[in-house]
Amino acid sequence: GDSVTQMEGPVTLSEEAFLTINCTYTATGYPSLFWYVQYPGEGLQLLLKATKADDKGSNKGFEATYRKETTSFHLEKGSVQVSDSAVYFCALSEGNQAGTALIFGKGTTLSVSS
Amino acid sequence: EPEVTQTPSHQVTQMGQEVILRCVPISNHLYFYWYRQILGQKVEFLVSFYNNEISEKSEIFDDQFSVERPDGSNFTLKIRSTKLEDSAMYFCASMGSYEQYFGPGTRLTVT
């Protein structure tokens, strides 16, 4: 079945460092891909998404490009801030029908120090 | 900004007891979901609900689980007879057109 694998954490960085969190997926069709973020004590929030190959999702300085050839959707940010400390989840949704379930990776904890 | 709310934030129950987890989705949303995350593991889909019926469910969602939208605003998840392995964070989500909005979760601890 479909699955998402993301790099194990925690990831610990200093402020202004470059961030990469790797995510690869397995899917039978053409999924949509997502990154969700969870700040302490809050629910999961959609950070960015991409719905087809070569699409780039971006938000709040974060970017991820849908790479069909490598089945990857790595999250990057050029200069992290302390406020980016959170858990990041890569996810996919198979098909375009509303109501389709999200399949998540295990989450990667990012800790940024000043 | 509208948000999904969940109550309680933490529920402790004894094995074999029934629990009901409550969610208030965003008011104009039509699709509703429950997910769970066992500590240290992936967020897993349980069930989706649309037009007053289940539209999709996972293998986890067996006869011990049920969902209901009793009054047009709440969306509940019931576990009839809890097991130790039901201990997890349970997330509710709702969706209008495309994006799923998640609540903060209910931590269920079964002792």
Image: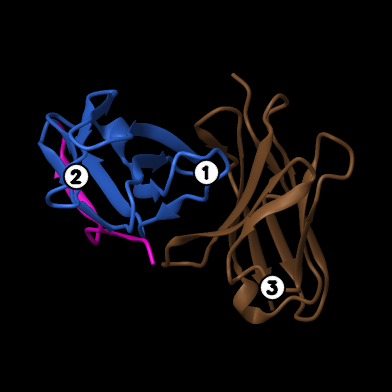
Chain colours: A blue, B brown
Amino acid type, mark 1 = Gly
Front residue (pair A35, A94): A94
Image side of residue B101 versus residue A50, left or right: right
Q: Quadrant of residue A33?
A: top left
Front residue (pair A10, B43): B43
Report in which chain the residue with disc 2 lies. Answer: A
Q: Report the span colored magenta.
A: A1-15
Amino acid type, mark 3 = Asp
Q: CA distance from mark 2 to mark 1?
A: 25 Å
Image side of residue A106 versus residue B85, left or right: left
Badge 1 density bin: few <14, some 14–19, many ≥20, Cα 10 Å: few
Q: Mark 1 against mark 3, which lies toward the viewer?
A: 3
Amino acid type, mark 2 = His
N-terminal of the two: label 2 or label 1? 1
Report in which chain the residue with disc 3 lies. Answer: B
Badge 2 density bin: few <14, some 14–19, many ≥20, Cα 10 Å: some
Front residue (pair A33, A86): A33
Q: Is residue B6 placed above or below A81 in the rendered structure?
A: below
Inspect the magenta stretch and tell me whether residue B51 lies in it: no
The residue beneath circle 2 is: A74
The residue beneath circle 3 is: B62
Residue B79 image offset from top left, x and y in percent: 76, 67
Q: Is residue A105 placed above or below A67 in the rendered structure?
A: below
Residue A104 image offset from top left, x and y in percent: 40, 55
Residue A17 image offset from top left, x and y in percent: 10, 36
